[in-house]
Amino acid sequence: MTRIAIFGEVMLELSGSDRSSMRLGFGGDTLNTAIYLARLGHVPAYLTALGQDPYSEDMVSSFEREGIDTRHILRHPQRMPGLYAIETDAAGERRFFYWRDRSAARAFFELPGADEATIDAVAADLLYFTGISLSILDEEGRRRLLGLAAGVRANGGRVAFDPNYRPAGWPQPEDARRLFEALAPSISFLLATDSDEALLFGAADPDIHLRRWLDWGADEAVLKAGANGAYLPGGANVPVSVPDRIEDTTGAGDSFNAAWLDARLRGETAEAAARAGNRLAAQVIGFRGAIMPRENA
C-alpha cells in the first residue's frame, strides 16, 4: 500500500447560512484531503497537533473512524485547536472568519514526538501539504517542513503541494512567493487554483500560472478553475463535471486534490486525474460543509 503522510492544521468549524443555527464540526484543507483519500482506499498518516480538550478527543476518534492513521497527532499541554466560521450565501459562495493565532498545530515542531513523526514521514511514498500548512508555522517550522519535503524526494518519494494562498496568513505576499519558489524543486504534483494564483501573482492566462511553477522546478502541475474545470500545461482544459445541485463550495478543491492524487498514484494520466477530481468536487459541493456524509461518498 502507498504510504501517504499529510501535514497540516485541523480546526473546529462553524458552518451555515444562519448564524443562529450554525453547525459545529471540524475541518481544514489538509484534513479534508486526508479524509477523501481514506474514502478512496488509502490510509494517510496525519501529522498535526491538537490539545488535551474534549473537542480534540472527538476529532481524533472521528479521524480514526474515517481510516486515518493518527499516530503522529501530537498533543499540546496548553493550546487547543483553532476555530473558523464559514458563512455561505444563496449561491453557495463562502466567507471565512478565523480564530487561530494560538492553535496547537502552530507549535507542532516544538512538541515531543515531532522528530519521530518527521523520521517516519520522510520514508513516505507521498507527502502532501499546502500553503496554509506553511503559513501557520514560524521560520524554523517552515525550514523543517521544507526539509521534510526535500528528504521525501531524496528517498524516492513524491511531494504534492497546493499553494492555497490566503493573504491573511502571510505578513507580505513576497514572503509566500519566496517560500513557494524555494519549495518548487521538491514538488512532484502542484495542485493550484486560478483565483489563488491571481491573488499572489496577478491575473494571467492559466498556462502562465502553470508554467511559472514548472519553470521553478515542479515536475507537473494542474490548475483548478471552478466552473471552468481544470487546466493542464499547454492550455488543455478538462471541463467541469456538472453537479446535481450546489449547496456549499467548501472543500471542492481539497476533494479534487484527493481524487487527483489517487488517480495519479494508480498510474492514471493527468487528464484522467483531472476528470476524477472534477467528479468528486461536483459531488462534494452538493452538501453543506467540507465533508459530505459517508453514505453519499
Image (spheres, rainbow, N blue to C red):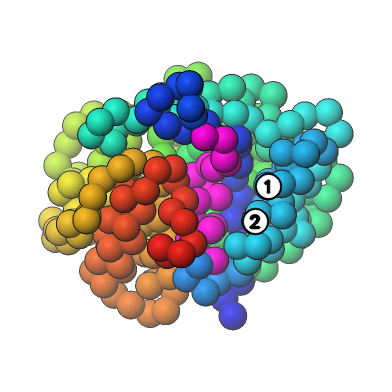
Q: What is the three-letter code of the residue carrying label 1?
A: Met
What label sits on residue 92 in the rendered view? Answer: none
Q: CA distance from mark 1 to mark 2?
A: 6 Å
Q: Magenta residues? A: 23-38
Q: What is the three-letter code of the residue carrying label 2?
A: Phe
290 versus 90 height, above or below: below
Q: Quick one: quadrant of the C terminus? A: bottom left
Q: Quadrant of residue 265?
A: bottom left
Residue 137 image position (x, y, % from top left): 63, 33
Q: Name the residue located 25 percent from the left edge and 45 percent from the top edge.
A: 246
Residue bearing mark 2:
63
* Magenta residue check for 37: yes
Q: Secondary structure at mark 2?
A: helix
113 versus 86 height, above or below: below
Relative to 276, 208 lies left or right: left
Q: Name the residue located 20 percent from the left edge and 59 percent from the top edge.
A: 241
Does residue 84 appear in the picture of this structure? Answer: yes
Q: Nearer the viewer, residue 12 or 152?
A: 12
Residue bearing mark 1:
59
Relative to 37, 254 lies left or right: left
Q: Are marks 1 and 2 in contact (CB under 8 Å)?
A: yes
Does residue 174 appear in the picture of this structure? Answer: no
Relative to 19, 195 lies left or right: left
